[in-house]
Amino acid sequence: MKDVLNYKGFIGSVHFSADDNVFYGKVEGINDLVTFEGETVKELTEAFQYVVDEHIKDCEAENIAPEKSYKGSFNVRISPELHRRIAVSAKMHGVSINKFISEALNQTISH
């Protein structure tokens, strides 16, 4: 993984501001905007872990899910040729395009 922090299943983006000489980021995959920063990698990591812990506490206090909810569908733009190849492969495997792509994605992220 590139330019991310991982803590308790939460992902934090990582960026650097040369103007401010500081690392900064935000917690990804949640409904709230939660940011963090630090002048060193250690400070950045500690700040990320702190805001994740605080976010979890806040969500527990408000009885809401700490992570973003996903509806299970999304649009992906691909070339017509790739679409055709996927449709043919799905048909040859005896499954729908959705099932074919879902299985391919699951296999990819499992490795």
Image (tube, rainbow, N blue to C red):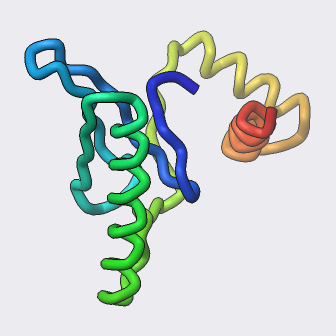
Is 77 drawn above or below residue 61 in the view shown?
Answer: above
Q: Residue at x 33, y 88 (%)?
A: 61
Is 68 drawn above or below residue 46 in the view shown?
Answer: below
Which residue sits furthest left? Answer: 19
The front one of 43 and 111 is: 43
The front one of 83 and 42 is: 42
Is 22 drawn above or below residue 73 in the view shown?
Answer: above
Q: Is residue 90 left or right of residue 41?
A: right
The front one of 33 and 40 is: 40
Q: How many labels sit on residues? A: 0
Q: Quadrant of residue 57?
A: bottom left
Q: Indicate the position of residue 16 as horizontal and vertical percent values.
A: 26, 21
Q: Indicate the position of residue 77 as horizontal and vertical percent values.
A: 45, 25
- Looking at the rendering, in which quadrant would you find the C terminus? top right
Q: Is residue 65 left or right of residue 106?
A: left
Q: Residue at x 29, y 44 (%)?
A: 26
Q: Quadrant of residue 62?
A: bottom left
Q: Quadrant of residue 65?
A: bottom left
- Looking at the rendering, in which quadrant would you find the N terminus? top right
Q: Indicate the position of residue 93 as horizontal and vertical percent values.
A: 90, 34
Which residue sits furthest right? Answer: 93
Q: Residue at x 60, y 10 (%)?
A: 81
Is 8 drawn above or below residue 38 in the view shown?
Answer: below
Q: Residue at x 26, y 45 (%)?
A: 36
